[in-house]
Amino acid sequence: MQAYEGSRGSSRWSGPGTLILWSTTTIAIPLALYMAFLYAPDERVMGAAQRIFYFHVPAAFVTFFGAVTIFASAVAMLTTRAPRWDHWTLATTEVSWVFCTIVLLTGPIWAKAAWKGRVGDWIFDPKLATTAILWLLLTGALLVRRAAASEELGARLGAVLGILAAVDVPIVHKATVWWRGHHPVLFAPGKRDALDPRMRLAFLICTIVFFLLFGLLVALRRQLAEVEHRARAAAERASNEGRS
Amino acid sequence: MAELTTAAFEARGLVKRFGPRLALGGVDLRLEPGHSLALVGPNGAGKTTLLRVLAGTLSPTSGSLRVFGHDARRDRRNAFARVGLVSHASLLYDDLTAIENVAFFARLYGIVEPTERALAVLEGVGVAHRAEDKVSELSRGLRQRVSLARALVHDPALLLLDEPFAGLDPRGIDLLCRSIETWSAAGRAIVLVAHDVERALSITRAFAVLDRGGWVDGGDSSAQQAIRVSAALHALGSTERTRDRR
Amino acid sequence: MRGAGFFRASAAIAAKDLRLEWRTWDSLSSGTVFALMVAWILALTLTPASGEAPELAAARYAPSALWTVVAFACAVSLAPAFRAERQGDAFAGLLAAPIDRGAIYLGKLASGLVHTALLALLGAGATAALFPWNPFERPATLALILGLHVLGLTVLGTLFSAIVHRVGRGEALLATLLFPTAAPLLLSAVRCTEASTEGRLFETAGHWLGLTAGFDLLYLCLGLLVFEFVVED
């Protein structure tokens, strides 16, 4: 008779992996907060406001890593057409959107601390401009997914837009760097060594925690997507059986 | 392929899923060249889905389809080159004239002299005198004939008809029935999806009943079969109605 | 017999679309009105600061104004690209034809490019008329800049038009998708136009031209690859 996707097998990710991720992240978040607010010393020029750096920059790292995961899962979705890859694409897109929003919200605070007062300046920063564009691209992909009449169509269009968005990121970055009128500057040297070792450690811990949090949220969102998918399939099956 | 005759099409294990909904649950179907088949079944049985997969406008979730020996997925240009599609929608551009429409599709099928060929086909279906009129200015019946011309312009060996009687007056229906019989006699394979079971079975050699994406019945078309199938479908339809009332 | 070849099928689709456009003026009429309206509003609002020479102000504003006009005109004129296929479900006829799906995209892209290129010329004319600024001094470099950037906008716009059409939305969603994705194109277009007005396009904006050419090629390939996933059921 009609074969529905098995209720076993595909749920293996919800097992020990997620649990370990859960517990590690739960322990690590207070640690990160401690490192960022208490352990790391005050920055001389910017003062306490500089501490936003421990959240802003890791969130940005995670966002751009998120773009890579969107690209990978979207390509897998379009080549295999398997719903499980769509669940990954949906999860990575939504969670990346959340981290992207965090970057944009913390951006002006960081900019205010760094450039003293001229909040508007941050839109000229290539990295933040790129993030803003990425935010719009991700929002567009999610909007189209919502607007699609069926789950399947939404999955395909969401994957297509995810690929187009991810590919755009490096180009947007290049363009916004060039926009400032100078030829590309690859690295601003010197600053790294000036960093206090305690600051560097706090930053490292916060970055790790942000990646853990990203992984956990993606895993949970993916599971939720799968449960939703199975619930819809079950409802469909029930309505089919009711007919005979 | 080692087989002696190449089937008009051969479908194996066709599955089509729309998200969680299973529209086709592993359909096998083979039609010999020159044969005709009526596809019947209640609403939502998957008839139109199956026809659209056979026409190449819908790709199956899994399963294989060979049309005149060519794999539909890997070699769509050869597979669908000899398939003609008539639907209840006209599949025409309202703002183009009849001849422009037919000639356009002739070009897509790689016909060398598209306008000449289009005019000949329009003559064949009896609308040559309105060839220069926009499709939006034609009556439903005339538009349907232009649709037929569109489907026949590349001289298909397999014709797929999806509810072609919808919206036609009795004269139009009669005319279309006779055309179908002529095409069948000319050796074209035909698949017909229609609501009216008795009419569908009266003009095809065989029939198949689809329900919830799978086969439930089938055989040679005959008057007794037509009555039996029609009664069975009526019963299916009425259980559906009781369920809706609940 | 097999279906028409890739480029033959694209040409047939493009010719059909241009014929339809000639008959209905669906896309060019709204694009023209929109382009002129945006140009007029920008000319009204972007005025020189007190004491600033109008030519200097124009040199600063006009390239951005030109590309704002072109971007909006592209979005508006490409939105109806798949509207004709909706009547009579003609799109099913296209999908049933034995042609490559990419050929449908290329055909739509070609006819769309005729519209957007005409509107870009109109935009250049309108900004030249409304600002004390003349982009037509160097017609060859202007053609190169318009061509490269409008091609990119059309490559993206055609694909997004198909997506928007699939979900049954209109111009607003198309613009929402098109503008952020095309951000590098728009930045490049403004820099190239500025450089061209100064007569030093290749010296100061050569790297932008390279970026745009790469962008166009990359997204054209992506469009041809993914179009199938957008249109099929």
Image (cartoon, coloured by chain):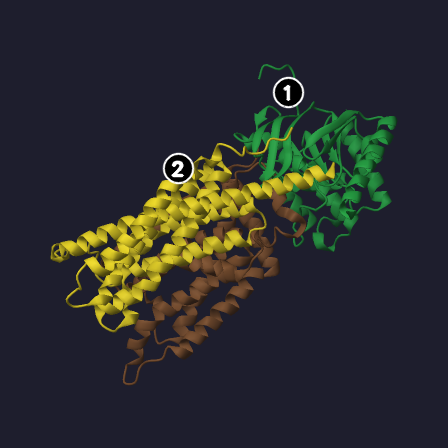
Chain colours: A yellow, B green, C brown
Residue B197 screen position, x and y as percent: 82, 35
Decide if residue B77 is on the left or right side of residue C178. right
- Please tell me which residue lies in front, A93 or C115: A93
Q: Quadrant of residue B185?
A: top right
Mark 2 to mark 1: distance in Å?
Answer: 54 Å
Q: Which secondary structure, mark 1?
A: loop
Q: Quadrant of residue B40?
A: top right
Where in the figure is residue C38, as x and y percent of width and height? 46, 71
Q: Quick one: which residue is furthest to the bottom in this view?
A: C51
Q: Name the residue located 53 percent from the left edge and 49 percent from the top edge.
A: C14
Neighbor class of circle 2 (other Cα within 10 Å; few <14, some 14-19, many 20+) is few
Residue C206 vertical placement versus C46 (above, below): above
Q: Is residue A202 above or below residue B215?
A: below
Residue A224 falls left or right of residue B175: left
Q: Which numbered disc covers residue A16?
A: 2
Q: Is residue B25 visible?
A: yes
The amino acid at mark 2 is: Pro
Which quadrant, please, contains the N terminus of chain C? top right
Q: Which mark is residue B6?
A: 1
Q: Label 1: chain? A: B
| Residue at mark 2: chain | A
Residue B182, percent across and down? Answer: 79, 31
Residue B92 horizontal/vertical position (percent): 67, 48
Three-letter residue code for mark 1: Thr
Q: Quadrant of the C terminus of chain C?
A: top right
Q: Nearer the viewer, mark 2 or mark 1?
A: 2
Q: Nearer the viewer, residue A161 or B144?
A: A161
Would you place residue C78 above or below residue C233 in this image? below
- Tally the numbered discs: 2
Q: Residue at x 34, y 72 (%)?
A: C61
